[in-house]
Image: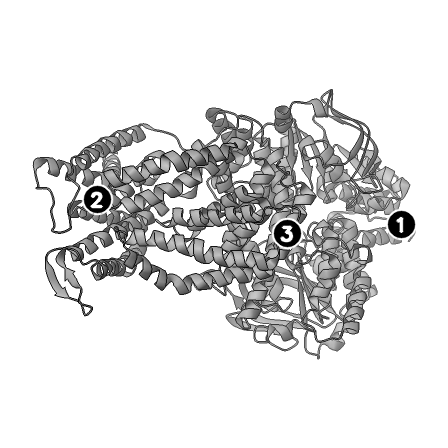
């Protein structure tokens, strides 16, 4: 069993239930928010620790930093279409090209760094988690290194991921931030009011992937072969 | 003692026939200031990278390199990192962190040095390089020169015993480049650090160099003290001789038997001595000399073909580019960047706008391209306001801009695709498109580069590819922003040749540049931009005859005798006329 | 105005913000909420001046009202019925007050974050992360360097593209989007290719050698020790108070909160001091400065 599996097992079997238990018995009104926030932080910890433990090489660091920064700065290229944000698409591309772990880091870093420029808030951990998860899943699903995924498959994944994962989690998070008690009614309202926004976001991601996925993946492949960017890990 | 001993070193890249380095033998002594020169692709950078193992590219290598007596490969990694400092061409790319102080500490952190020592070393470096004032700044706020200085300082913080620099000033303006080279000389002199440098600015760097090594096709063709190496190049009639300082070339062209001068100062002394030797120079006072040169310059001016002669006839036409009392500022309450800027460019001219950083040169270009609009005054491109013409119209068959970074134009995987992409919205049929593309390929000499990735090309080749791209728009006016930045002497000549040929086709060329030598050699008219206005403007000769500091090295050497002698060839011709008279 | 709390050690700032954020989210008791909200608003005013006034009036007040209305619309628990909605559901005093409390929490947290954004500048994050997760800290500082650089390059590319007739500011959204994609694509190539030189520069300066240390300009001083002691003392009192239930309030079915006693007063005072620690520090430094200047 790899170290990541051990960590995940420990977290899923011990720490998360303990947190939920503690939340229910020690906190009254805010338990939903705190418990969910802590769980989100827990899921990020193994990535951070494994990354540190591995002592990543310069090129690997650079690749992650470049992709995360591109995701943030990509907004500047679309200053004339403000509702079009390429972040999710770039995170997916990074996950596909650099692997699941790097995909998670690119997503989480992009979420964190973009809030340095647009303002930190209680939403920061949620965003980091969502982007990270999307990058991670992209890396897991499109694992085969010998063949790049087709555009249509990527687009379907991108659209669903944005709508279900990002929209789903962020809306859930904002409900818990806004109102302390969990209520299905409020959750439904939040989802309905946010639906169009999420749909535009998903459409933008699909559009970006449709146009950008191929050239960007090729560019990444080029630097990977030209500079031996990330050695194949067995 | 030799810090590096290189024996029979050969190196070839994978899947490439010709070796990049062939049988290099070189001993580099401790404390030496060694300059390595050669045209792009001669193997200079490849050789430098052999001296720093972590940067050595993959490939086949023969021969051996000893560092301080030990085989380089067996030197401990920590020692290599600390003792062999490497400074890259682009400071923008090499700065890793976002704060100046953090960048200074980066290498020391890698070496695992404790807080207290890092604090001391960082403070020392900041004081040595005069960085205290921007010590807390973010890297994004720095100027190009400051960033390059930061890169140097952050390498020096590790206290290297040898400093290797790969064209460190090629992205800097002349003033920042001089500052940088001055700092290098100081490091060499005050700290005794060995310096190995590749550089195109030989005029500035040779006076501080102990030893010049010239490379060609992966081999060393000349090696020795700068004057000795130059002499060797002359003997071989090597093309690199054209890159030598003006004083050396004038001396060689005249065929003097006196000691070869290297700097402008020595050149001035030598010229007088030479003319005295030939017993033709007026041996009177400086006053007298000045007066006589005045008369000479008049005769010379009368003899020279007046470059304005053709233009006067065209004066009645609509100017290709006209600025009339243009005022501009970026922010409502900001300072004016352009203040009553006026100039005209006549059709078919090669017009150069010179000036330092922040003088308003680039802003002028943006206004001409209609990217910005003046708040007062007129900008006219062939009589039309560029900001009001739809970009599609303005930039097709009208105006074209070659940006300072050719890379801002590259989208595709190969040069050929780049060219095809340019015509994607064109209404031409397939055959006409192909013809047009073939035409620019031939014009810009891209035949051998078509299948390459644009980023695999050298700086000069990238620029030619970018130029070919914009030429597909069939411009009547071509604007170029710093076109000679980072180019070696040969690529500059090639560029000049292309511009000449465009001119012959009737294209008006306007360029903004720091490069005095280039403008002096190839422009029809020059203008000096300072503090948002044109301070001086005129045909090349009269322009440079009028300024005393802002002029070519050849002119500074000979200006007391022949004011209008701008290029090395001018001075040589005058000398020969004087001595044969 | 210059903020003196910003010049204390980042660890102090981190402890302070974590504490006030958690407490602000946990404590629904009106006295605690009022203390936190006032301190947060005062601190943001001190940090941002006039900009903060706009932020508070135009951003936070409407948000407060919205959040306050939202709860009673969905929550119908409580015994004191005020009136009935058209749908037949009652609006109760308890749910209204609960809504106000929830809104207050939310707004206070947002204001704290806006203070945090000013005080905890990026270099402090890099420093704090560098202590525990050096590789991630390096990733952060690299991204902070790359983002402004890429934004600048995107502008340059956009200008260059405009000059070959590909304008992103004109045309329908499809054309714009396509040209935007071109810019992003050019930017990507440029970023990736140039980044390899950055990697070289890291390697050339020994990155990857074992035993890397983490340097920072921040130094722990006597003032930081005093601040830490004060912080821990106040945290202890508030923590004990919370354990004793001083901070709790019951909203449903009817409102119930602990009586005001000397013990509760102590906890209130401690919480008030904790929240306004930066303000007090600024006052103290101001007084010190004045007395130094007048003494000389």
Q: Mark 3 or 1, which is nearer the eye?
A: 3
Q: Position of residue B171 (x, y in %)?
A: 65, 48
Count of labels in the image: 3
The answer to whether B8 is drawn above or below residue A163 in the figure is above
The residue carrying mark 2 is C27
Tags 3 and 1 touching, CB below 8 Å: no
Q: Residues within 10 Å of mark 2 (few under 14, many from 20)?
A: many
- Image mark 3: chain: A
Same chain? Circles 3 and 2: no
CA separation in Å, label 2 and label 1: 98 Å
Residue nearest the observer in this picture, B11 or B84: B11
Relative horizontal placement of residue B329, taking residue C189 as reference (left or right): left
Q: Tell me the element at label 3.
A: loop
**Residue identifier under label 1:** B579
Q: Give the numbered dot on residue A148.
A: 3
- Kindly identify which chain the residue marked by label 2 belongs to: C
Q: Nearer the viewer, mark 3 or mark 2?
A: 3
Q: Nearer the viewer, residue B206 or C239?
A: C239
């Amino acid at each position: 069993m790899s170290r990541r599996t051990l960590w995940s097992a420990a977290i899923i079997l011990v720490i998360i239930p303990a947190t939920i238990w503690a939340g229910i018995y020690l906190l009254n009104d805010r338990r939903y928010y705190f418990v969910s926030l802590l769980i989100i932080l827990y899921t990020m910890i193994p990535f951070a620790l494994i990354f540190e433990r591995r002592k990543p090489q310069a090129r690997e660091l650079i690749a992650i930093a470049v992709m995360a920064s591109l995701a943030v700065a990509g907004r500047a290229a679309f200053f004339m279409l403000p509702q079009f944000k390429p972040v999710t698409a770039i995170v997916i591309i990074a996950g596909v090209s650099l692997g699941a772990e790097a995909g998670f880091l690119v997503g989480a870093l992009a979420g964190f760094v973009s809030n340095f420029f647009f303002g930190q808030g209680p939403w920061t951990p949620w965003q980091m988690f969502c982007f990270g998860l999307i990058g991670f899943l992209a890396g897991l699903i499109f694992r085969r290194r010998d063949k790049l995924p087709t555009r249509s498959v990527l687009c379907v994944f991108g659209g669903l991921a944005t709508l279900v994962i990002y929209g789903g989690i962020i809306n859930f998070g904002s409900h818990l931030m806004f109102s302390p008690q969990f209520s299905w009614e409020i959750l439904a309202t939040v989802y309905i009011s946010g639906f169009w926004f999420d749909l535009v976001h998903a459409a933008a991601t699909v559009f970006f992937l449709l146009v950008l996925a191929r050239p960007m993946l090729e560019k990444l492949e080029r630097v990977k072969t030209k500079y031996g960017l990330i050695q194949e890990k067995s | 003692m030799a810090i590096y001993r290189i024996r029979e070193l050969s190196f070839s890249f994978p899947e490439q026939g010709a070796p990049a380095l062939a049988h290099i033998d070189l001993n580099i002594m401790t404390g030496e200031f060694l300059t390595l020169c050669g045209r792009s692709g001669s193997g200079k950078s490849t050789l430098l990278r052999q001296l720093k193992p972590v940067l050595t590219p993959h490939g086949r290598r023969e021969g051996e390199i000893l560092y301080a007596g030990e085989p380089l490969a067996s030197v401990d990694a920590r020692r290599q990192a600390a003792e062999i400092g490497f400074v890259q061409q682009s400071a923008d790319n090499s700065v890793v962190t976002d704060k100046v102080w953090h960048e200074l500490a980066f290498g020391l952190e890698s070496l695992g040095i404790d807080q207290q020592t890092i604090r001391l070393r960082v403070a020392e470096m900041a004081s040595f390089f005069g960085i205290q004032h921007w010590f807390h700044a973010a890297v994004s706020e720095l100027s190009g020169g400051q960033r390059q200085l930061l890169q140097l300082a952050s390498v020096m913080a590790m206290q290297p015993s040898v400093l290797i620099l790969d064209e460190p000033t090629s992205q800097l303006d002349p003033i920042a480049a001089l500052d940088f080279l001055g700092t290098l000389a100081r490091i060499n002199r005050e700290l005794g650090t060995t310096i190995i440098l590749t550089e195109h600015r030989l005029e500035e760097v040779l006076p501080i160099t102990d030893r010049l090594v010239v490379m060609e096709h992966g081999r060393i063709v000349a090696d020795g003290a700068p004057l000795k190496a130059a002499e060797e190049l002359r003997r071989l009639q090597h093309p690199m001789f054209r890159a030598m300082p003006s004083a050396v070339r004038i001396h060689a062209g005249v065929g003097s038997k006196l000691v070869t001068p290297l700097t402008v100062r020595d050149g001035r002394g030598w010229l007088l001595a030479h003319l005295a030797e030939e017993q033709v120079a007026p041996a009177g006072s400086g006053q007298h000399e000045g007066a006589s040169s005045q008369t000479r310059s008049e005769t010379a001016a009368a003899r020279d073909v007046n470059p304005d002669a053709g233009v006067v006839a065209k004066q009645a036409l609509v100017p290709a580019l006209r600025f009339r009392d243009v005022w501009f500022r970026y922010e409502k309450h900001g300072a004016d960047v352009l203040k009553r800027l006026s100039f005209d460019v006549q059709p078919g001219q090669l017009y150069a706008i010179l000036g330092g950083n922040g003088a308003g040169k680039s802003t002028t270009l943006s206004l001409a391209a209609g990217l910005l609009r003046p708040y007062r005054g007129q900008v006219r491109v062939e009589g039309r306001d560029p900001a009001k013409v739809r970009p599609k119209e303005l930039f097709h068959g009208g105006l074209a801009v070659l940006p300072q970074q050719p890379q801002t134009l590259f989208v595709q995987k190969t040069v050929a695709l780049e060219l095809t992409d340019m015509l994607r919205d064109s209404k031409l049929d397939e055959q006409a498109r192909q013809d047009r593309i073939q035409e620019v390929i031939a014009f810009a000499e891209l035949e051998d580069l078509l299948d390459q990735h644009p980023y695999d090309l050298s700086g000069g080749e990238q620029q030619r590819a970018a130029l070919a791209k914009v030429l597909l728009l069939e411009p009547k006016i071509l604007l170029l922003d710093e076109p000679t930045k980072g180019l070696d002497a040969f690529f500059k000549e090639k560029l000049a040749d292309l511009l000449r040929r465009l001119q012959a086709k009737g294209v008006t060329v306007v360029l903004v540049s720091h490069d005095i030598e280039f403008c002096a050699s190839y422009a029809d008219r020059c203008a000096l931009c300072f503090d948002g206005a044109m301070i001086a403007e005129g045909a090349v000769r009269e322009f440079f005859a009028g300024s005393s500091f802002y002029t070519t090295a050849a002119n500074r050497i000979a200006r007391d005798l022949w004011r209008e002698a701008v290029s090395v060839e001018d001075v040589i011709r005058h000398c020969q006329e004087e001595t044969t008279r | 105005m210059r903020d003196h709390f910003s010049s204390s050690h980042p660890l102090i700032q981190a402890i302070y913000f974590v504490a006030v954020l958690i407490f602000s989210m946990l404590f629904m008791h009106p006295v605690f909420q009022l203390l936190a909200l006032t301190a947060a608003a005062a601190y943001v005013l001190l940090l941002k001046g006039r900009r903060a006034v706009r932020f508070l009036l135009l951003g936070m007040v409407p948000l407060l009202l919205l959040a306050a209305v939202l709860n009673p619309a969905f929550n119908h628990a409580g015994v004191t019925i005020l009136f009935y909605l058209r749908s037949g559901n009652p609006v109760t005093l308890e749910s209204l007050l609960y809504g106000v409390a929830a809104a207050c929490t939310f707004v206070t947290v947002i204001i704290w974050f806006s203070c945090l954004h000013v005080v905890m500048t990026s270099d402090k994050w890099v420093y704090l992360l560098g202590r525990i997760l050096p590789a991630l800290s390096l990733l952060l500082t690299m991204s902070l360097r790359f983002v402004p650089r890429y934004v600048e390059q995107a502008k340059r590319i956009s200008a260059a593209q405009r000059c070959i007739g590909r304008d992103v500011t004109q045309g329908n959204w499809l054309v714009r989007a396509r040209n935007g994609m071109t810019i992003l694509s050019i930017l990507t190539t440029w970023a990736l290719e140039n980044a390899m030189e950055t990697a070289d520069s890291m390697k050339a300066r020994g990155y990857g050698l074992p035993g890397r240390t983490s340097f920072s300009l921040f130094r722990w001083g006597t003032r930081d020790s005093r601040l830490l002691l004060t912080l821990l003392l106040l945290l202890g009192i508030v923590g004990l108070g919370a354990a004793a239930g001083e901070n709790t309030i019951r909203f449903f079915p009817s409102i119930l909160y602990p009586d005001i006693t000397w013990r509760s007063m102590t906890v209130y005072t401690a919480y008030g001091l904790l929240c306004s620690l930066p303000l007090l520090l600024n006052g103290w430094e101001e007084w010190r400065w004045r007395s130094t200047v007048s003494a000389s």
